[in-house]
Amino acid sequence: MKPASPSATPKRVLLIHYSQTGQLSAVAEQIAAPLKADPGIDLHVETLVPLTPYPYPWPFFRFLDAFPESAHLVPPPLQPLSLTGDEHFDLVILPYQVWFLAPSLPFTAFLKHPVGRRLLAGKPVVTVIACRNMWLSAHEKVKALLDEAGARLIDNVALIDPGPTLATFITTPRWLLSGKKDGFWGMPAAGLSDDQVRRSRRFGLALRDALHTHREQGPGPLLDGLAAAEVNPSLYFSERAGTRSFFIWGKLIRLAGGPGRWTRRPLLAIYVVFLIAMIVTLVPTSLALQALLRPVMRPWLSRIRDRFEQPSGSATHRLPLYDE
């Protein structure tokens, strides 16, 4: 699709970026490419750099040690941003990862940073999630933080691992802890497929055209009809249970000391046993019960799906315009 005619004054777009494995970077690059190539759009990419880097692959206990602060939205310190907070942007794009059913810690740090809050105040925001498959709780937390900053969430994109739910409980930790994302033992590769990453370009194309017609000044959405966010409501119960578990145990573990303290390790070891037991019992049981009770629960599940698919939705009627 040919780009729309450039506006007289270039539109300024801010894209905040942090990726641990590189998957989110690939998605962000696809979305940014049409904006970067357009002379009518001035794109600024701000890369978040934690003061203490998060390793990839993650050592086992370092991985677990991130969950108490993630669950409680405790921001880590960041390297100084290149922006002051006084800059004006017409649109802000916020790609983020999900850590322990919450936004990643560097992303949380930006949303709570004084400069970040000034940059977001009054601005239309597009969030982009790339994760395993449970993103509803993180999305709710991000919406609350955006509300606190005075931002306007006009679109949300959710790209999830296409593998079976139970398989991803194995393939995703293996990827994060070893760096290996290839398929094994009949299981699929971890993470988004190459096709999902490539096709995320459609969102950048649609944003480009919306900016040229000033649609970002309205209530949105700008990405409707592009299969932006499809919700599996059957995972909602598991997310609620997991979120509560992370919060309660996270509070207990934080009493044993700050991140990296050896005193947290015994509690983390106990918790990982509890977590595995919960995954192998609660998730299959929840899915089985929902399948059995689906006729009774269908209206309620539909309301959950409709609620979380907003504002961009899962409709596909505009895909022929932008899916290259």
Image (cartoon, rainbow, N blue to C red):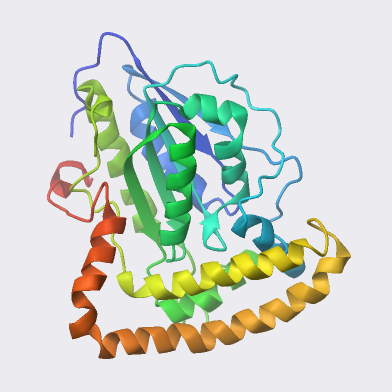
Residue at 61%, 33% in the rendered image? 113
Q: Nearer the viewer, residue 8 or 155?
A: 155
Residue at 79%, 63% in the rendered image? 255
Q: Which image quarter is the N terminus in?
A: top left
Residue 13 drawn above or below residue 146: above
Q: Taking the image as drawn, is residue 185 in sight? A: no
Tell me where residue 300 appears, x and y as whole percent. 24, 72
Which quadrant holds residue 218? top left
Tell me where residue 36 appears, x and y as whole percent. 39, 27
Residue at 42%, 31% in the rendered image? 92
Q: How many marks?
A: 0
Q: Which image quarter is the C terminus in?
A: top left
Residue 287 drawn above or below residue 216: below
Q: Nearer the viewer, residue 66 or 82?
A: 66
Is residue 315 rendered to the left or right of residue 262? Answer: left
Is residue 316 rendered to the left or right of residue 216? Answer: left
Task: List the single residue furthest toward the top.
Answer: 8
Tell me where residue 250 appears, x and y as whole percent. 67, 65
Tell me where residue 239 appears, x and y as whole percent. 46, 70
Q: Which of 50 and 238 is in front in this view?
A: 238
Residue 36 drawn above or below residue 292: above
Residue 232 drawn above or below residue 77: below
Residue at 23%, 22% in the rendered image? 214
Which quadrant holds residue 78? top right
Is residue 244 rendered to the left or right of residue 272? Answer: left
Q: Taking the image as drawn, is residue 197 in sight? A: yes
